[in-house]
Image (cartoon, rainbow, N blue to C red):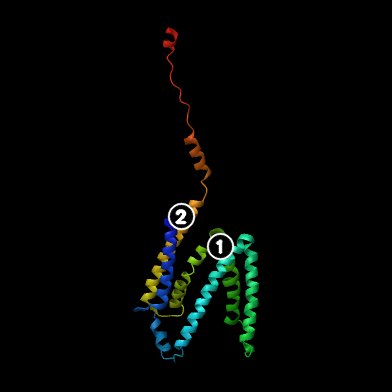
Amino acid sequence: MNEATCQAKVIGTILTFGGTLLMALYKGSELSVMGSSTRHAMADQLPQTVTGNHWIIGTCFLLIACAGLSAFYILQAMTLRKYPAEMSLANWVCVFGALQSSLVAIFAERHHPHAWSLGWDTRLFAPAYAGIVSSGVQYYIQASIVKSMGPVIVTAFNPLRMIIMTTLACIVLSEKLYLGSIIGAIVVLLGLFLVVWGKYKECQGRMPPSPERITLHNANSIQLPITAPTNDSNDNKT
């Protein structure tokens, strides 16, 4: 904890966590972006059915999901040490995830068989994108980064999802943008910079010196023998 790199990573983690909470809990003044007021004027007229119980249950499930995802990153790092095959590990994760999702879907949609119907619309494209990109490609890239740099970098970039999601929601869905989201995003980026800087300095300190530096150091360490001058004339006189 006394090293600057460790302190930077700890402070950066606290800042990213605080920035994420700031984006989620604090709104502030509303910022008009790309005419979002038109859609929200119609959306505000719709009845609001969300109650306090839903917020409590949703928060509990989000905390459980965060704990499970953290345990997944740690188990993935431990598995890659004994099984260093990123592609194979990503395939196994997708296979078991598909089995679990199928069992949950069968139980949840047992009274709605039409939920399994597919078509050339979001009913097909959304599951295909989630399976190929969000699961397969993501797990492979994630495993490669965990194997080379550790799980700290992967988890440090997770708060960027909220920034990207907020940006796309404002552009695509014309959602409202609040000042708290902007301040939280700046805090998240500052914390991410500190974590990446600390990890970079830590990896730089562990790297072995380059062959050029070793050769230069050896050349500088070579010392020529020092010989004292002898006076031949004095020797001849004696």
59 horizontally vs 38: left or right: right
Q: Residue at x 42, y 61 (%)?
A: 194
Q: Earlier in the sequence, mark 2 or mark 1?
A: 1
Give coordinates of residue 54: x percent, y percent: 48, 86
Q: Please identify the quadrant where the C terminus is shown.
A: top left
Q: Residue at x 61, y 60 (%)?
A: 81
Q: Residue furthest top?
A: 237
Decide: is 190 above or below 54: above
Q: Amino acid at mark 2?
A: Lys
Q: Residue at x 64, y 61 (%)?
A: 85
Q: Residues within 10 Å of mark 1 (few under 14, many from 20)?
A: many
Q: Residue at x 42, y 74 (%)?
A: 21
| 149 and 11: which is toward the camera | 11
Q: Where is mark 2, residue-wise?
A: 201
Residue 138: which quarter of the image? bottom right
Decide: is 231 above or below 166: above
Q: Residues within 10 Å of mark 2 (few under 14, many from 20)?
A: few
Decide: is 197 above or below 161: above
| 69 and 116: which is toward the camera | 69
